[in-house]
Image (cartoon, rainbow, N blue to C red):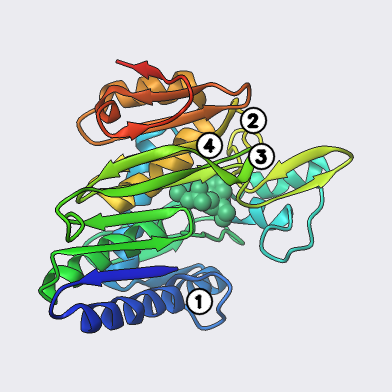
Amino acid sequence: MTVTAYGKNADQAVEDAVAEINRLDAMLSTGISDSEIYRLNESGSGVLSLDASAIVSEALQLNEDTDGALNVAIYPVVQLWGFYSGDFRVPAQDEIDEKLALADAGAISFDRSSNTVSFEKESMAIDLGCIAKGYTSNRIMEIFREDGVDSGIVSLGCNVQTLGKKTTGTDWRVAIQDPEDPEGYLGTVNVSDKAVITSGSYERYFEENGVRYHHIIDPQTGYPADSGLESVTIVSSDGMLADGLSTSIFIMGVEDGTKYWEKHRDEFDMILYTSDGRLMATEGVEDCFESDRDILYLR
Ligand code: AMP
Ligand code: MG
């Protein structure tokens, strides 16, 4: 992770931002044994902090909006594939069926007035990894502002969010990784006050018998999403939305992803890279996306 801030209170702002990243990680990580989410998963119910409530609330809304593509209850299936233990393997179909039955977002009951979550099925568990980094980068922008910083950038792996412009008055340049070449770039986007968040099949995967299995699971099949996309970048002023949508549209594919964008075009733009090497982008980034390749614009 990289946190950069400019101006008088920059040192304080960076210190506060790093403390916030650590606080949220300790609270939200499924792998930390006294985290809020770990305890929720152990007991099947719990009262959530305001942070976790905001994330769960957005995740449930996106589950509805994306017709189930984004599903935080997919965690048992993700575990089955070994993406948490590192013990990677292709599970048998009956194992996938068993865990998929637990991946039922509709069985997460969430009482917004008391911030209480309970799982209606035994052994359910959730993982906010698809959206928590975007929440975190949103929070960092708030902390920057509170600390009097008006120019800064945070990068949490494939999640980048920017505040204001560079001190030179120009936009931030954010590079988008080439899924086929970790050293190369698909292009760069020039933005201010925006999050640029990517989900890709190259981020976490294993190979067995020449087949690549990555970490983004299609809740319809229990298998890594095979939608014809290799990477999805979302550009939006809302980091949490961008994070949730990068994962969702990766699963939905070009056609359904484009339909979704058509309905929500005032909320975000997207840059897609397909398995057959096509680069597409929505018209909102036409003036700020630079690439040496041909770009097919969606309008
Ligand atoms: P991201 O890097 O934001 O695309 O999030 C990917 C992570 O979200 C994975 O590593 C899994 O932990 C989790 N995940 C995988 N599939 C899904 C899904 N369909 N819905 C929600 N979270 C998922
Ligand atoms: Mg995401």
Question: Tag 1 or tag 2, which sits nearer the N-term?
Answer: 1
Q: Position of residue 181 (x, y in %)?
A: 63, 42
Q: Nearer the viewer, mark 4 or mark 1?
A: 4
Label 4 or label 3, whichever lies nearer to me, is: 4
Inspect the image, locate mark 3, and give the three-letter code of the amino acid beneath it.
Pro
Q: Which residue corresponds to mark 2?
A: 226
Q: Residues within 10 Å of mark 3 (few under 14, many from 20)?
A: some
Q: Three-letter amino acid code at disc 2?
A: Asp
Q: Is residue 70 visible?
A: no
Q: CA distance from mark 2 to mark 1?
A: 33 Å
Along the horizontal axis of the image, is 208 left or right of 23?
right
The picture places residue 288, in percent across and down from the top left corner, at 27, 34
- How far apart, in angstroms, are the residues tagged by discs 3 and 2? 6 Å
Q: Are marks 3 and 1 in contact (CB under 8 Å)?
A: no
Select label 3 or label 1 by which is in front: 3
Q: What residue would you read off at disc 4?
A: 231
Q: Quadrant of residue 125?
A: bottom right
* Element at label 2: loop
Measure the alpha-carbon separation of dots 4 and 3: 13 Å
Q: Residue furthest front?
A: 168
Q: Secondary structure at mark 4?
A: strand
Q: Who's the residue at 80% across and 45% down the image?
A: 207
Q: Which residue is mark 3?
A: 224
Return the mark for residue 39: 1
- The kind of residue on which mark 1 rests is Arg
Q: CA distance from mark 4 to mark 1?
A: 33 Å
Task: Answer whether residue 161 is visible to the viewer in this image.
Answer: yes
Choose between 251 and 195: the one closer to the eye: 195
Give 174 or 47, whichever is nearer the viewer. Answer: 174
Q: Earlier in the sequence, mark 3 or mark 1?
A: 1
